[in-house]
Image: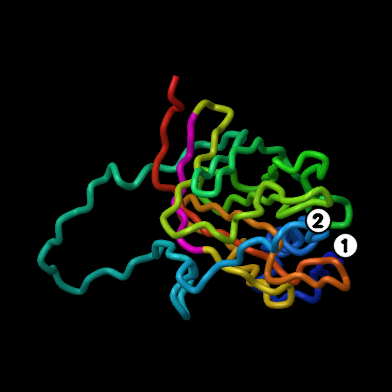
Amino acid sequence: MARPPRPHARSLPPWARWMLPALVMVALGIGLINHGLQRAAPPPQPSAAQQFAPHTAPPTPDPVAPADPAPSPAAPAPPTDLVPPPLAPSRPTRVRIPAIRVDAPLTGLSLLKNGQLASPPEKDPNLAGWYQDGTTPGSVGTAIIGGHVDTHTGPAVFYNLGALPKGALIDIDRADGTVARFTIDAVEAYTAKAFPDQKVYGPTPRPELRLITCGGGFDKRRKQYLGNVVAFAHLTDTRRPLP
């Protein structure tokens, strides 16, 4: 599958130049994940029930809340233990998604000289990769994990990503011994031409996670996927692994 050219800075609007690395990472979805030969049944695609409500963005908190002009009756404060504090950066080592039976090691991925993100080795279909020059899962910001939907030998690690229901849990084991638990907010599919880079890769004021693989239909003549499936999640718990 041919890789798209690296975006040229002069072709980007002024607001986007500072986030060129994030825009370059669109390659994670349309160039990184190698397509398979569709020897098995097509991978599941997100339904309307799994998507964000129309005309809404991922539910991130407003970093600047307007001050109330006058005091108002105080509402009960939510329990602070329901909002885990962000974790310090630490290398993720494993991703576990019980709802779709994923239990896979993670390998670090970096940008190639052409500006594209390297892909996980295809020889191990049960291997996912994380963008090691970006946010680590559990820290403030948007962490990125990509995995093959299939390979030339059959289904791969994120084959069932499109079937993830809202509320499903994702555990990320980290090198410091902590586990960052994320909850799925939505799963959506996009065509390559309509991939929403800001929505997927843009910065967030809280720890969030994106899982990305190929999807959006398959071109049998060209033997490649037409787009991507993206799962959106946010941090909901942190803990130490059980002994």
Q: Which label was assigned to residue 119? A: none
Q: Position of residue 122 (x, y in %)?
A: 81, 45
Q: Position of residue 20 (x, y in %)?
A: 72, 63
Residue 149 is drawn in which quadrant?
bottom right
Depth check, front residue: 240 or 90: 240
Q: Which label was assigned to residue 34? A: 2
Q: Position of residue 50 (x, y in %)?
A: 48, 67
Depth check, front residue: 203 or 99: 99
Dot 2: element: loop
Disc nearer the start of the sequence (1/2):
1
Check disc 2 and give the amino acid type: Asn
Depth check, front residue: 65 or 166: 166
Q: Which residues are magenta?
A: 178-186
Residue 221 is drawn in which quadrant?
bottom right
Classify the position of the C terminus by image quarter: top left
**Marks 1,2: beta carbons within 8 A:** yes
Q: Position of residue 13 (x, y in %)?
A: 70, 77
Tell me, yes or no, whether the highlighted magenta stretch contains residue 220: no
The tally of labels here is 2
Q: Is residue 203 visible?
A: no
Q: Which label was assigned to residue 1? A: 1
Relative to 55, does residue 189 appear above or below in the rendering?
A: above
User: In whole angstroms, how far apart are the C-alphas of marks 1 and 2?
Assistant: 7 Å
Tell me, yes or no, whether the highlighted magenta stretch contains residue 185: yes
Q: Is residue 108 visible?
A: yes
